[in-house]
Amino acid sequence: MNDVAMWRAAAELLAVHGETAEAEALKCADAALDGGDVDGFNRWKRVAWLIVEMRKSSPRGSDVH
């Protein structure tokens, strides 16, 4: 998963799961690690971090067009 794909994954998780998006990304990270996929674990941890960063940079209650 490249950087663009990680940003897209983060945005999609936010759109679908809202406030629980970070938790969903962390579930994916745990599943990857349980399966022995360390690279997948690291990618999903980065997606979780991107979700936090996206929330910081977009004002709550505003629509992004």
Image (spheres, rainbow, N blue to C red):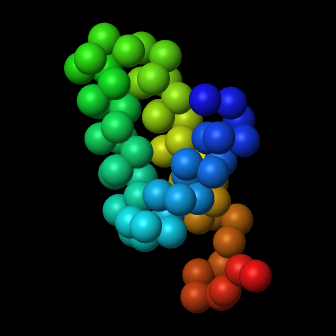
Residue at 71% from the left image edge and 80% from the top image edge: 64
Residue at 40% from the left image edge and 45% from the top image edge: 25
- Left or right of 60: which side holds 65? right
Is residue 54 in sight in this rendering?
Answer: yes
Please state the horizontal and vertical placement of residue 37, each as a whole percent of the image. 38, 15
- Left or right of 10: which side holds 28? left
Residue 39 against residue 43 in the figure, above or below:
above
Please state the horizontal and vertical placement of residue 42, each as a whole percent of the image. 49, 24
Residue 51 against residue 15 in the figure, above or below:
above
Residue at 23% from the left image edge and 20% from the top image edge: 34
Outermost residue toward the left in this view = 34
Residue 57 against residue 2 in the figure, above or below:
below
Is residue 49 in sight in this rendering?
Answer: no
Residue 2 sits in quarter: top right
Please state the horizontal and vertical placement of residue 31, each as a whole percent of the image. 27, 29
Residue 21 sits in quarter: bottom left
